[in-house]
Amino acid sequence: MGTTDRKLTSIEICAGAGGQAVGLHQAGFRHLALVEIDKHAAETLRHNIENRPEWRWEKEHCLVRQVDVKSFRPLEEVPAPESDGGESFPEGGAGLLRPRQLDLLAGGVPCPPFSAAGKQLGREDERDLFPTMLDLVDQLQPRAVMIENVRGLLEPERKFRYYRNHIKNRLRKAGYVICGWRVLHAQDFGVPQLRPRAILVAIREDEYRGFSWPEPEKKIRTVAQALGPSMERRLGGKDSPRYVEWLKNASLGTVAPTLVGGSKKHGGADLGPTRAKKAWAALGVDAMGVANDEDKMVDPDRDLGTLERGPKLTVAQAALIQGFPETWEFKGGGKTARYRQVGNAFPAPVAAAVGESIREALLRTGPLHEDPTPEFEAEDDPSLVAPELPL
């Protein structure tokens, strides 16, 4: 088996319902562990791994841990990778995972500390899991690291620049090359939604032979394209007045506003704040709630709406807007709990695009990069290091 066919291994923390896991799986990574604290999302992960044929390797080898990531001890819990069915993995096959054996550590750590919708407490927010992520880097010493967060983390405010500098400095101290911190827009990678996300990629110095960020796709996938078949089915066929009206409105727009997961403290799910609801209305969608599943619809006027109001989205349709495969099933609780799993996810196509770039970098052969130090960034000025904010 050639080098390009090799299956790389990964561990993902804060895995949610599997958006990033799906994307990395599509990019050729095989998951040794998926860690998620929410019981409903963990149930979704287990269900899909158990029932998706393409996840048969994970069915035998992947540890799904429903636990606070601060309690996760990978070197005490995760079995070493084994080859299976002719697939080649790093040395292992007996006992537990060892340092420097993992290819990729990835995670979408919680965004409230940096979200524009929150108080932006950053390092002072108790929900901040960047220190935990960096502790795991120290323990596992993976070949590559991928961290996803909200765009707010890259805002120019000095407190965020301090914190970004600390994260990068700690990774450098651990022996990693910072490949960059980029804002990637989901709409550039086949997702019919805005959803900008901040992505950090770092590669261990003794593995670094260069890295190239994924290029945006030339064509945008629209809401009308993504939801057309399911809306036609739900609204009574291509000639029904409801479907014709929805398609007319949806075709006037392109991509949807960013889906939000909502707070467990504030009632049921809807599709976002007032501005987002207006954008959804322009696309022919009632954003005041989430509809029942197609096979559970009780009140057509409530779920399908009127010609003026338009239909609400089902959880399955929201998942299409988020870039999940149509076959990915969401489990646990009612529709609100399942919708939150969708709204909080990292779009799979974006994860796949970055994952493919990481894979290509890790499979490069030849000498190490002559200059492993990336281009100097203004925020890396030592004067921006804040000793009172240690990681």
Image (cartoon, helix red, strand yellow):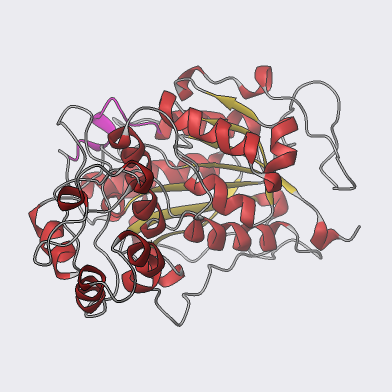
Is 274 placed left or right of 205 in the picture? Answer: left
Q: Residue at x 78, y 34 (%)?
A: 81
Q: Can the viewer see residue 238 in this picture?
A: yes
Is 135 placed left or right of 140 in the picture? Answer: left
Q: Residue at x 66, y 19 (%)?
A: 77
Is 164 placed left or right of 132 in the picture? Answer: left
* Residue 128 is a magenta residue: yes
| Quadrant of the drawing holding the C terminus | top left
| Quadrant of the drawing holding the N terminus | bottom right
Examine the rendered structure and indicate whether residue 374 appears above or below residue 386.
below
Please state the extent of the stretch shown in magenta in the rendering: 120-129
Q: Give percent across and percent down for residue 228.
A: 36, 70
Q: Can the viewer see residue 380 in this picture?
A: no
Residue 28: quarter of image? bottom right
* Residue 39 is a magenta residue: no
Q: Give percent across and percent down for residue 236.
A: 30, 64
Q: How many marks?
A: 0
Q: Residue at x 35, y 67 (%)?
A: 232
Of residue 259 and residue 53, the one placed in the foreground of this image is 53
Of residue 278 and residue 355, the one placed in the foreground of this image is 278
Q: Residue at x 70, y 45 (%)?
A: 53
Examine the rendered structure and indicate whether residue 24 appears above or below residue 125.
below
